[in-house]
Amino acid sequence: MERVILNALFRPPSSNFFTSSSEKSIHLVDLRSTCEKKLQMVKTKTKAADANIYAIVGSDEAEVKRVAAELASNLTPSGAGDFGLETIDGAADNAEQAAARVSSTIDALQTLPFFGSTKVVWLKNVNFLGDDQKARSTAVQSALEELSELLGRGFGSEITFLISATEVDKRRGFYKALVKRAELQVFDRIDSGRAGWEEEATEIVRRRAKKRKLQFDDDALDLFVLLTGGDTRQIENEL
Protein backbone atom coordinates (compact mmCIF):
# COMPACT_ATOMS: atom_id res chain seq x y z
CA MET A 1 0.00 0.00 0.00
CA GLU A 2 2.83 2.41 0.88
CA ARG A 3 4.51 1.68 -2.46
CA VAL A 4 1.29 2.50 -4.34
CA ILE A 5 0.93 5.82 -2.51
CA LEU A 6 4.55 6.79 -3.05
CA ASN A 7 4.36 5.95 -6.75
CA ALA A 8 1.26 8.11 -7.09
CA LEU A 9 2.83 11.02 -5.25
CA PHE A 10 5.91 11.01 -7.44
CA ARG A 11 4.32 10.68 -10.84
CA PRO A 12 6.14 12.46 -13.65
CA PRO A 13 4.81 15.91 -14.57
CA SER A 14 2.90 14.49 -17.52
CA SER A 15 0.58 12.57 -15.18
CA ASN A 16 -2.88 14.10 -14.87
CA PHE A 17 -3.43 14.07 -11.09
CA PHE A 18 -6.49 16.26 -11.34
CA THR A 19 -7.73 18.65 -13.98
CA SER A 20 -9.79 21.77 -14.17
CA SER A 21 -13.11 21.79 -15.94
CA SER A 22 -11.33 23.38 -18.92
CA GLU A 23 -9.14 20.25 -19.18
CA LYS A 24 -6.00 22.17 -18.20
CA SER A 25 -3.61 19.90 -16.32
CA ILE A 26 -2.80 20.75 -12.71
CA HIS A 27 -0.28 18.71 -10.74
CA LEU A 28 -0.52 18.11 -7.00
CA VAL A 29 3.07 18.16 -5.79
CA ASP A 30 2.81 18.54 -2.04
CA LEU A 31 0.45 16.66 0.24
CA ARG A 32 0.65 16.53 4.00
CA SER A 33 0.99 13.27 5.83
CA THR A 34 -2.13 11.34 6.75
CA CYS A 35 -3.87 12.60 9.86
CA GLU A 36 -3.78 10.17 12.75
CA LYS A 37 -7.45 10.79 13.45
CA LYS A 38 -9.74 10.77 10.45
CA LEU A 39 -12.45 13.41 10.57
CA GLN A 40 -15.74 13.54 8.79
CA MET A 41 -18.08 16.43 8.40
CA VAL A 42 -21.68 15.43 8.88
CA LYS A 43 -23.99 18.32 8.13
CA THR A 44 -27.42 18.39 9.71
CA LYS A 45 -29.70 21.32 9.06
CA THR A 46 -33.06 22.10 10.60
CA LYS A 47 -35.48 24.77 9.46
CA ALA A 48 -35.86 27.78 11.69
CA ALA A 49 -39.01 28.27 13.70
CA ASP A 50 -37.89 31.90 13.94
CA ALA A 51 -36.18 33.33 10.87
CA ASN A 52 -33.82 35.54 12.87
CA ILE A 53 -32.12 32.86 15.01
CA TYR A 54 -29.20 30.83 13.64
CA ALA A 55 -26.95 28.24 15.29
CA ILE A 56 -23.77 26.63 13.92
CA VAL A 57 -22.48 23.86 16.19
CA GLY A 58 -20.47 20.64 16.11
CA SER A 59 -17.16 18.99 16.87
CA ASP A 60 -15.57 19.86 13.50
CA GLU A 61 -14.06 23.10 14.80
CA ALA A 62 -12.62 24.30 11.49
CA GLU A 63 -15.90 23.88 9.64
CA VAL A 64 -17.99 25.43 12.42
CA LYS A 65 -15.76 28.52 12.43
CA ARG A 66 -15.72 28.80 8.64
CA VAL A 67 -19.47 28.46 8.18
CA ALA A 68 -20.29 30.76 11.10
CA ALA A 69 -17.96 33.50 9.84
CA GLU A 70 -19.43 33.24 6.35
CA LEU A 71 -22.98 33.37 7.69
CA ALA A 72 -22.21 36.36 9.94
CA SER A 73 -20.85 38.22 6.93
CA ASN A 74 -23.93 37.40 4.86
CA LEU A 75 -26.37 38.37 7.62
CA THR A 76 -24.72 41.68 8.52
CA PRO A 77 -26.51 44.60 6.83
CA SER A 78 -24.44 46.13 4.06
CA GLY A 79 -23.11 49.56 4.87
CA ALA A 80 -23.92 49.21 8.57
CA GLY A 81 -20.25 49.27 9.59
CA ASP A 82 -19.43 48.48 13.21
CA PHE A 83 -23.06 49.02 14.20
CA GLY A 84 -24.28 46.13 12.05
CA LEU A 85 -22.47 43.31 13.87
CA GLU A 86 -22.09 42.99 17.64
CA THR A 87 -19.74 40.11 18.48
CA ILE A 88 -19.53 38.58 21.95
CA ASP A 89 -16.62 36.25 22.66
CA GLY A 90 -18.05 32.96 23.91
CA ALA A 91 -14.67 31.41 24.77
CA ALA A 92 -14.85 31.73 28.56
CA ASP A 93 -12.13 30.76 31.04
CA ASN A 94 -14.49 29.89 33.89
CA ALA A 95 -18.15 29.63 34.87
CA GLU A 96 -18.39 33.20 36.12
CA GLN A 97 -17.03 34.54 32.85
CA ALA A 98 -19.33 32.26 30.83
CA ALA A 99 -22.42 33.46 32.69
CA ALA A 100 -21.33 37.06 32.11
CA ARG A 101 -21.01 36.44 28.35
CA VAL A 102 -24.54 35.05 28.24
CA SER A 103 -25.82 38.08 30.17
CA SER A 104 -24.07 40.38 27.68
CA THR A 105 -25.78 38.50 24.86
CA ILE A 106 -29.19 38.95 26.47
CA ASP A 107 -28.54 42.68 26.88
CA ALA A 108 -27.46 42.96 23.24
CA LEU A 109 -30.57 41.15 22.01
CA GLN A 110 -32.77 43.53 23.98
CA THR A 111 -31.01 46.67 22.73
CA LEU A 112 -32.40 48.04 19.48
CA PRO A 113 -29.92 49.00 16.75
CA PHE A 114 -29.09 52.63 16.08
CA PHE A 115 -31.07 54.81 13.69
CA GLY A 116 -33.84 52.26 13.20
CA SER A 117 -31.60 49.91 11.21
CA THR A 118 -30.88 46.19 11.79
CA LYS A 119 -28.03 44.35 13.47
CA VAL A 120 -26.60 40.89 14.09
CA VAL A 121 -25.65 39.68 17.58
CA TRP A 122 -23.06 36.88 17.32
CA LEU A 123 -22.19 34.80 20.39
CA LYS A 124 -18.99 33.39 18.94
CA ASN A 125 -16.86 30.30 19.68
CA VAL A 126 -18.91 29.25 22.72
CA ASN A 127 -17.14 26.69 24.91
CA PHE A 128 -19.63 26.23 27.76
CA LEU A 129 -22.37 24.16 26.15
CA GLY A 130 -20.64 20.83 26.72
CA ASP A 131 -20.56 18.48 29.70
CA ASP A 132 -17.63 19.83 31.70
CA GLN A 133 -17.63 21.43 35.14
CA LYS A 134 -17.93 24.94 33.72
CA ALA A 135 -20.96 24.05 31.60
CA ARG A 136 -22.68 22.23 34.47
CA SER A 137 -22.33 25.12 36.91
CA THR A 138 -25.50 26.62 38.34
CA ALA A 139 -24.54 30.13 37.18
CA VAL A 140 -24.10 29.05 33.56
CA GLN A 141 -27.24 26.92 33.47
CA SER A 142 -29.31 29.74 34.97
CA ALA A 143 -27.96 32.21 32.42
CA LEU A 144 -28.64 29.81 29.53
CA GLU A 145 -32.16 29.22 30.82
CA GLU A 146 -32.77 32.97 30.78
CA LEU A 147 -31.44 33.15 27.21
CA SER A 148 -33.67 30.23 26.20
CA GLU A 149 -36.70 32.04 27.59
CA LEU A 150 -35.80 35.14 25.58
CA LEU A 151 -35.46 33.07 22.41
CA GLY A 152 -38.84 31.56 23.15
CA ARG A 153 -40.53 34.94 23.66
CA GLY A 154 -38.81 36.39 20.65
CA PHE A 155 -37.18 39.76 20.12
CA GLY A 156 -37.42 42.54 17.57
CA SER A 157 -37.30 41.70 13.88
CA GLU A 158 -34.53 44.31 13.63
CA ILE A 159 -32.16 41.92 15.42
CA THR A 160 -30.69 38.62 14.21
CA PHE A 161 -29.05 36.21 16.65
CA LEU A 162 -26.20 33.89 15.65
CA ILE A 163 -24.45 31.44 17.98
CA SER A 164 -21.50 29.19 17.13
CA ALA A 165 -20.11 26.48 19.40
CA THR A 166 -17.86 23.42 19.11
CA GLU A 167 -18.57 21.75 22.44
CA VAL A 168 -22.26 20.89 22.71
CA ASP A 169 -24.13 18.50 24.98
CA LYS A 170 -27.19 17.63 22.93
CA ARG A 171 -29.04 16.40 26.02
CA ARG A 172 -29.20 19.88 27.54
CA GLY A 173 -32.26 22.08 27.49
CA PHE A 174 -30.48 24.93 25.73
CA TYR A 175 -29.53 22.74 22.77
CA LYS A 176 -33.12 21.52 22.55
CA ALA A 177 -34.25 25.14 22.51
CA LEU A 178 -31.91 25.79 19.56
CA VAL A 179 -33.33 22.78 17.73
CA LYS A 180 -36.82 24.19 18.22
CA ARG A 181 -36.16 27.88 17.60
CA ALA A 182 -33.09 28.23 15.39
CA GLU A 183 -32.03 27.41 11.88
CA LEU A 184 -29.51 24.88 13.10
CA GLN A 185 -26.51 23.47 11.25
CA VAL A 186 -24.43 20.71 12.85
CA PHE A 187 -20.93 19.79 11.68
CA ASP A 188 -19.68 16.77 13.61
CA ARG A 189 -16.73 14.45 13.51
CA ILE A 190 -17.71 10.83 13.11
CA ASP A 191 -16.17 7.67 14.47
CA SER A 192 -13.20 6.98 12.21
CA GLY A 193 -13.79 3.28 12.70
CA ARG A 194 -17.27 3.43 11.25
CA ALA A 195 -17.70 1.96 7.79
CA GLY A 196 -18.47 4.40 5.01
CA TRP A 197 -16.42 7.42 6.12
CA GLU A 198 -14.44 7.34 2.87
CA GLU A 199 -17.56 7.78 0.74
CA GLU A 200 -18.70 10.81 2.72
CA ALA A 201 -15.20 12.32 2.66
CA THR A 202 -15.10 11.78 -1.10
CA GLU A 203 -18.30 13.79 -1.49
CA ILE A 204 -16.82 16.65 0.54
CA VAL A 205 -13.73 16.74 -1.68
CA ARG A 206 -15.79 16.60 -4.88
CA ARG A 207 -18.04 19.44 -3.74
CA ARG A 208 -15.17 21.72 -2.77
CA ALA A 209 -13.14 20.88 -5.85
CA LYS A 210 -16.15 21.74 -8.01
CA LYS A 211 -16.30 25.22 -6.47
CA ARG A 212 -12.72 25.70 -7.68
CA LYS A 213 -13.55 24.22 -11.10
CA LEU A 214 -11.30 21.23 -10.45
CA GLN A 215 -11.99 17.63 -11.36
CA PHE A 216 -10.11 14.59 -10.02
CA ASP A 217 -9.56 11.36 -11.86
CA ASP A 218 -10.73 8.37 -9.80
CA ASP A 219 -7.31 7.19 -8.60
CA ALA A 220 -6.22 10.70 -7.62
CA LEU A 221 -9.47 11.29 -5.75
CA ASP A 222 -9.08 8.07 -3.75
CA LEU A 223 -5.51 9.01 -2.85
CA PHE A 224 -6.46 12.56 -1.90
CA VAL A 225 -9.21 11.29 0.42
CA LEU A 226 -6.81 8.81 2.01
CA LEU A 227 -4.14 11.43 2.66
CA THR A 228 -6.47 14.14 3.97
CA GLY A 229 -8.54 11.71 6.03
CA GLY A 230 -11.73 13.75 5.70
CA ASP A 231 -10.17 16.63 7.66
CA THR A 232 -12.00 19.68 6.31
CA ARG A 233 -9.21 22.08 7.28
CA GLN A 234 -6.60 20.00 5.45
CA ILE A 235 -8.85 19.55 2.42
CA GLU A 236 -9.18 23.33 2.15
CA ASN A 237 -5.43 23.83 2.48
CA GLU A 238 -4.53 21.21 -0.12
CA LEU A 239 -7.08 22.31 -2.71
Image: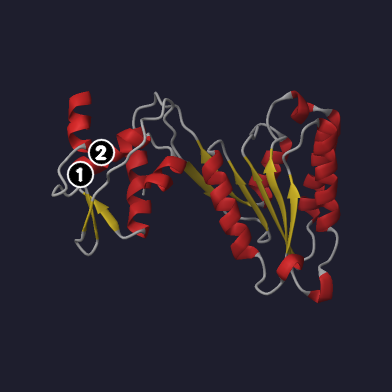
Local secondary structure at mark 1: helix
Q: Is residue 156 shown above or below 62? A: below
Q: Which residue is mark 2?
A: 222
Q: Which residue is mark 1?
A: 218
Q: What residue is drawn where x is 67% and y is 70%?
A: 77
Residue 46 in sight here: no
Closest to the observer, 171 or 34? 34
Q: What residue is drawn where x is 66% and y is 65%?
A: 76
Relative placement, left or right, of 226 versus 3 is right
Local secondary structure at mark 2: helix
Amino acid residing under circle 1: Asp
Amino acid residing under circle 2: Asp
Q: Is residue 78 shown above or below 199? A: below
Residue 162, quarter of picture:
bottom right
Q: Position of residue 140 (x, y in %)?
A: 81, 34
Relative placement, left or right, of 156 versus 163 is right
Residue 159, quarter of picture:
bottom right
Q: Position of residue 160 (x, y in %)?
A: 71, 61
Closest to the observer, 147 or 217? 217
- The answer to whether marks 1 and 2 mark residues whose Cβ atoms lie closer than 8 Å is yes
Q: Residues within 10 Å of mark 1 (few under 14, many from 20)?
A: few
The CA span between labels 1 and 2 is 6 Å
